[in-house]
Amino acid sequence: MPRRTTKTQSGTHQTMKNVSFESLIASWLLQDGWQVFSPMLDHGHKTDLLISDGPNFHRIQIKSFFSKGKNQEIINCWTPSPIDYVVLFARNGNWGVIAQAFAEKRRPLNHQEHRKFIRCKKNFLREFHLI
């Protein structure tokens, strides 16, 4: 069985984790019938995935965070980019949140418009369809 024998730098390791969340969402959306596009470079545009059902396109930003409890806030780091949805993954949990992009600088993670999901395809897609 192959074993990785090299050390990964911490910054590189965090980037790898972030990309894995993007790949996970892309996989789930592909399995749901969406066309999924990944920008070659999203620097400055804040678009991790572009999805389409044919005539409609939606821009998605994917973030991860360390969960600190019920009063946690999301810091808007995507404005003024015109994204449509934000998917947030708790790095220290098995859950996440889907939100329509918002213009406020901060918003509570447990905002009434946000959809919490358990980290599995079925649960994510159910909540994504309800947003």
Image: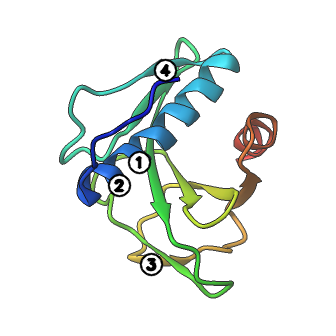
* Kind of residue at disc 2: Gln
Kindly identify which numbered label has been placed on residue 36. Answer: 4
Q: Is residue 128 left or right of residue 22?
A: right
Distance between the alpha carbons at the discs numbered 4 and 2: 23 Å
First of labels 3, 4 by sequence position:
4
Q: Is residue 118 above or below residue 66?
A: above
Distance between the alpha carbons at the discs numbered 3 and 4: 28 Å
Q: Is residue 100 above or below residue 114?
A: above
* Kind of residue at disc 4: Val
Q: Is residue 75 above or below residue 37?
A: below
Mark 3, secondary structure of its residue: strand
Residue drawn at point x = 40 percent, y = 40 percent: 19
Q: For mark 2, does the 10 Å Cα neighbourhood hold few (<14), some (14 to 19), or many (20 or more) residues?
A: few
* Kind of residue at disc 1: Asn
First of labels 2, 3 by sequence position:
2
Q: Is residue 56 left or right of residue 17?
A: right
Kindly identify which numbered label has been placed on residue 14. Answer: 2
Question: How far from the left and from the top, in percent, is residue 67?
Answer: 58, 75
Residue at the extreme top: 54
Q: Residue 48, located in which quarter of the rendered image?
A: top left
Distance between the alpha carbons at the discs numbered 4 and 1: 17 Å
Kindly identify which numbered label has been placed on residue 18. Answer: 1
Residue drawn at point x = 69 percent, y = 58 percent: 95
Kindly identify which numbered label has been placed on residue 106. Answer: 3
